[in-house]
Image (tube, rainbow, N blue to C red):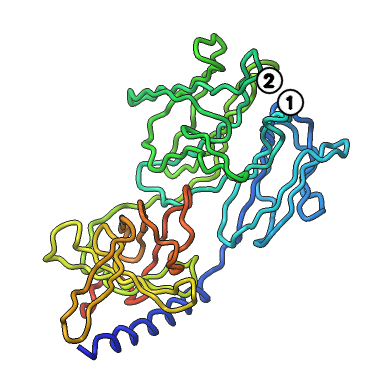
């Protein structure tokens, strides 16, 4: 009984050392920031980054790709081409962030011009699917000047139909908190059925516009709804952010056994094992090593669909070991060397081995470090 803690500590240091080495050896991806002007009625603008003009003369519904902004804290300022400041804000750009900055609002006191941040999701796109992220930036007002929802309906070749009332700044929820468009709807794993989208300013409105969304395997698509339905018509812009290589989903086998790591998160490691005699979903088990907020080493256990922290117990066995569930989990294997881990419905913020997960960046992409290849340990 005295041997187990020492054994676990040895594994912990070995895993943390290898994971840190893997991170420092990985190809470091650059962040990406795009900018779109979707504020109906706003003039042509210049965007300044830390006091220097980065792009100029950007008109309504123009979209600028990759501003070339480095990771770090930045001050953003939007000026009209005549020189007046429309809005400004600070934001922190992470090393792996992919962000779209939207100029939005209509300049009225209850909805001033503002820069919204909308993060690209980090899900892997699975075979025969594409993804769609939607931002509703339309500003529809009633005759009394109050903000109204935009009515959106869809009709797809598969026969699927649907409709929502979308609020400014988001999708079905419409949440804008501190200038971050958390409520923006997004779909991961959208099947390849061409869809038409219909817009109406208010319920019963005859001002209906129809748009056809692009569709292709691996397509990462942005949908931006803007306008005010009066002097600026309601419109939809589809921004094709690129075609990504799709991944399959495979069953777990002993070939997944080994040490895995998250390339975007230094100082952590995940030891994964396949237990073929267990019932589903408990055939995949893992130990996640990292650090707590006080910089002390810590670990959690993944058992099928839960993240657990074990507490209690003693060498004499007079006190039981208790597993406390911190979150629900889902791990999907795409090959014996690539997997994605998603956590739901839990509080794991005290465990910094896991990154700051929030929609739509809510997936941990894992790569296997050792053993190399797809043979189970001891085979090959």
Circle 2 is placed at which residue position? 232
Q: Quadrant of the C terminus?
A: bottom left
77 relative position to 1: left or right: right
Picture residue at 50% right of the left edge, 33% below the top: 171
Q: Is residue 275 above or below residue 138?
A: below
> x, y percentage for residue 41?
74, 26
**Is 90 situated above or below 167?**
below
| Quadrant showing the N terminus | bottom left
Q: CA distance from mark 2 to mark 1?
A: 7 Å
Query: Horizontally, is 17 left or right of 279 in the view?
Result: right
Give the class, few, some or many, for how many residues have Cα within 10 Å of label 1's Cα (few <14, many ≥20): some
| Most foreground residue, 378 or 286 | 286
Within 10 Å of the Cα at label 2, are there few (<14), some (14-19), or many (20+) other Cα atoms? few
Whether residue 264 sits left or right of residue 142 in the image: it is: left
Query: What residue appears at the point 67 percent right and 35 percent down from the top-left corner?
Result: 104
> Image quadrant of residue 271?
bottom left
Residue located farthest toward the left when viewing the structure as drawn: 277
What label does residue 41 carry, if any? 1
Is 219 or 119 nearer to us in this picture?
A: 119
Tag 2 near tag 1, CB within 8 Å: yes
Depicted 118 relative to depicted 270: above or below: above
* Disc on res. 208: none
Which quarter of the picture shows residue 236? top right
């Amino acid at each position: 009984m005295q041997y187990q803690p020492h054994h676990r500590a040895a594994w912990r240091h070995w895993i943390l050392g290898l994971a840190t080495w893997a991170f420092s050896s990985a190809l470091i991806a650059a962040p990406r920031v795009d900018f779109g002007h979707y504020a109906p009625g706003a003039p042509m603008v210049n965007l300044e980054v830390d006091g220097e003009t980065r792009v100029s003369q950007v008109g309504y519904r123009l979209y600028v790709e990759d501003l070339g902004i480095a990771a770090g804290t930045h001050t953003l300022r939007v000026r009209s081409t005549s020189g007046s400041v429309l809005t400004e804000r600070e934001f922190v750009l992470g090393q792996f962030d992919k962000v779209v900055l939207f100029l939005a609002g209509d300049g009225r006191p209850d909805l001033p011009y503002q820069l919204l941040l909308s993060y690209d999701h980090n899900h892997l796109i699975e075979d025969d699917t594409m993804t769609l992220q939607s931002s509703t930036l339309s500003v529809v007002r009633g005759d009394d000047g109050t903000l109204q929802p935009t009515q959106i309906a869809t009709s797809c070749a598969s026969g699927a139909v649907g409709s929502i009332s979308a609020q400014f700044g988001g999708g079905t929820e419409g949440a804008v908190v501190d200038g971050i468009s958390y409520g923006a709807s997004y779909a991961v794993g959208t099947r390849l059925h061409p869809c038409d989208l219909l817009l109406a300013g208010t319920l019963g409105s005859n001002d209906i516009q129809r748009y056809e969304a692009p569709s292709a395997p691996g397509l990462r698509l942005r949908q931006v709804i803007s306008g005010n339905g009066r002097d600026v018509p309601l419109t939809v812009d589809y921004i094709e952010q690129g075609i990504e290589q799709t991944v399959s989903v495979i069953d777990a086998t002993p070939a997944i056994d080994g040490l895995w790591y998250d390339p975007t998160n230094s100082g952590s490691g995940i030891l994964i094992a396949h237990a073929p005699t267990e019932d589903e979903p408990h055939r995949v088990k893992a130990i996640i090593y990292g650090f707590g907020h006080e910089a002390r080493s810590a670990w959690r256990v993944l058992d099928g669909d839960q993240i657990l922290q074990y507490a209690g117990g003693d060498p004499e066995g007079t006190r039981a070991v208790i597993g406390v569930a911190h979150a629900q989990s889902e791990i999907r294997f795409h090959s014996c060397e690539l997997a994605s881990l998603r956590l739901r419905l839990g509080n794991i913020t005290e465990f910094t081995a896991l990154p700051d997960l929030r929609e739509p960046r809510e997936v941990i992409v894992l790569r296997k470090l050792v053993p190399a290849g797809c043979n189970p340990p001891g085979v090959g």
